[in-house]
Image (cartoon, rainbow, N blue to C red):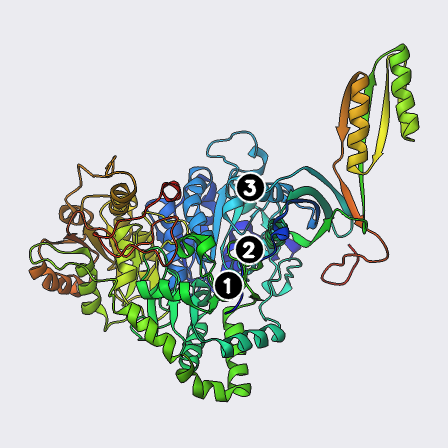
Amino acid sequence: MSKSAYEIDSNIDKIERYVIVAWVDNEAGVLARLSGLFSGRGYNIESLAVAQVDEERKISRITIATYGTEGVIKQIQAQVLKLVPVHKVNIYPINEKTIFRELALVKFLGTGDVLNKAEQLCVDNNFEFLDKTPKSFIVQALGRRTEVDEFIKKIKALGEVSISRTGALAMNKGAETVKDNKGKVL
Amino acid sequence: MGENDYQLTGAEIVFKALHEHDVEYIFGYPGGAVLPLYDQISKEKKIKHILVRHEQGAGHAAEGYARSSGKTGIALVTSGPGATNMVTALTDALMDSIPLVCITGQVPTHLIGTDAFQECDTTGITRPCTKHNWLVKDVNQLAETIHKAFHVANSGRPGPVLVDIPKDVQFQKGIYKSSKDVVVETYKPKVKAELSDIEKAIELIIKSKKPIIYSGGGVINAGVKASDTLTEFIRITNFPITSTLQGLGAFPGSDPQFLGMLGMHGTYEANNAMHECDLMINIGARFDDRITGRVDAFSPSSKKIHIDIDPSSINKIVKVDLAIVGDCLSVLSDMLTTLKNKHSDFCNSNKENISGWWKQINKWRDKKSLSYKKDDKLIMPQYAVERLYEITKNQDSYITTEVGQHQMWAAQFYKFNKPNRWMTSGGLGTMGFGLPAAIGTQVANPGKLVVDIAGEASILMNIQEMSTAVQYKLPVKIFILNNQWMGMVRQWQELLHGKNYSESYTEALPDFVKLAEAYGAVGIRATNPKELDDKILEMVDIDRPVIFDCLVKKDENCFPMIPSGKAHNEMILGPEDKEGITEEGKVLV
């Protein structure tokens, strides 16, 4: 008797975090198409970063951090690839083969000792100060999402903060690249 | 002569582009924001406009036209309510993979975003219910956009697209671009499958002792040749075949190798064969919930091959062992070639190999799951469809339906021997689909018999299209199985909701015979089985639109049935067999 398609190792159904990158034509409504697809089909968006990366070809790179089973992530990839303005879709599992970066701007409010303590935390992390006053500072936190998360948790414990985050960016290590249908590097 | 002499208005560009795509008919309704396009229609010689009575009707008529002809359906409506009324038809076409190009007017560009009269965010509203849509703000992009629209609607898995054109763009002059000069960079669906996958499939086919083919609308969409190739494949392998609702007609319905439709109201033999098979070959179907029943008990011991042009259909609901992404015609042809060239011994011996399986299938067949209690005084709805089939089977007939019990009886009892003869709303389940779809079908197939098998509730949802049928002398026949109930709702209330018949009875129905006459059509009523044949013959002979009010038994249920939440081998066969509907099942739709 042949093996059933359902007798699959249950590990496959584990929910994991992934970063999905889509290269799209930078045209009106393209972000709405993508985000609408996610909400319409009940997929999650943890963060989303988007900007044009090629002025000549008018291509934007959309980076979505999400989570799901491997099956769901593959389904997301297939669904996104169906959108007409999408050139390529790549999935980056969270592992050592990929560089992940997220940037946060953190404005800290406080004076005296509290301010000094918070400043020291930033110095310990090697984060760059972008603005300083006697009652506040703005620091640029840069790193993997977990690193940024941890920093924010610590600085929040010291006082009042205002935070702006970019969402994750991803790029694979080494000389390997994703190419468009004509073989041009994306 | 200046440069401007070569320029066309936006409206002229639209029609020039439509000519390039051999458009013959447009289904539409005018309004403020499309008047420049309608100016052009009045000058038009090649393209005929069919004026519907409601924009939803234009959409479904274009669907019927497309499904019955294999061409692209074209709808033209105005901004605001014109566009919002199209939403149901666009969603319907998306679910059932029907190629439509819908052109909508939009308020002039300088008024967009100001809540202008009859303004709505058409591309925003229709984004999730089209394959793609465009708002054209530059007249010089108009020709290219329309060419792209046709490309997207027809490539890969077909579907609806929408082009929104502001009124000022329709007036402006611009340069025409031919479709030959348009390159679509991103949307390039894969049509041809890998040969290695074809060979893997053939290996599984040769080894199988209990195979079944489960074919769907993808075969119909791949063109008539795909249906012929499928038929040849079935002949050579001697495999049994079942079909989804949308796939009916790809393989002859009256053939002994055909097990009937599968799924919720499919036959006992088809569903049990799906459950017990050792190899399932899904050709152009999508494991819809109406097909699979309970997914975790779906065909537990089979290897599964899935052939589909849409990669996102694969492993979406049912995990398969071999996925073949490609066009059904291309894949079937490749499979057939490999079988014939490399495995001629299999072709000769396979009848014997799977004879035990056929024996088992014939045992299931002996259950006669479509049988029903005959009645002398009342017209049984199944009997009505059976008689309609018997009387019309020798002419090349086209059947559309509304949605509900009558639709399932039509699918069970009307046998389709050719593709593109069966137009029904499967995915979305749109009541009101059948009459406008019949109109579109009749437009595409003049001189042919077109029957909308309807329910008395569904038909009232787009009854206004009777006017369209009468205006264009389209002799469509509306065959209403009138039981005064929303039959499928009533059936579910009886079986799943403790006989709480909440709001499913229609207290005040129109007199359908008089209604037909009011529209300038012909009304016929049949009240008992003895007169049924004569009345159907009378209907078929009338070369005008007819409403046939067939009064049927009121509380008949549609069987067999897989109750929701149950597996293929847990069917209810008849009224005495209602055990086993679970609480979990009741929650499902």
Q: Is residue B209 among the parts visible in the rendering?
A: yes
Which quarter of the image is occupied by the C terminus of chain B? Answer: top left
Label 1's element?
Answer: loop
In screen coordinates, is B237 left or right of B252? right
Label 3's element?
Answer: loop
* Residue B21: image tag: 1
Residue that label 3 marks: A42
- Quarter where residue A42 is shown: top right
Circles 2 and 1: CB distance less than 8 Å?
yes
Observer-nearest of A87 and B569 = B569
Seen at 43% across and 66% down, the residue is B215
Circles 3 and 1: CB distance less than 8 Å?
no
Q: Amino acid at mark 1?
A: His
Identify whether B489 is placed above or below B330: above
In screen coordinates, is A76 left or right of B577? right
Chain at tag 3: A
Q: Amino acid at mark 2?
A: Ile
Residue that label 2 marks: B146
Q: Provide residue A5's location: percent of width, then percent of height.
A: 54, 61
Foreground: disc 2 or disc 3: 3
Observer-nearest of B261 and A162 = B261
In screen coordinates, is A18 left or right of B68? right
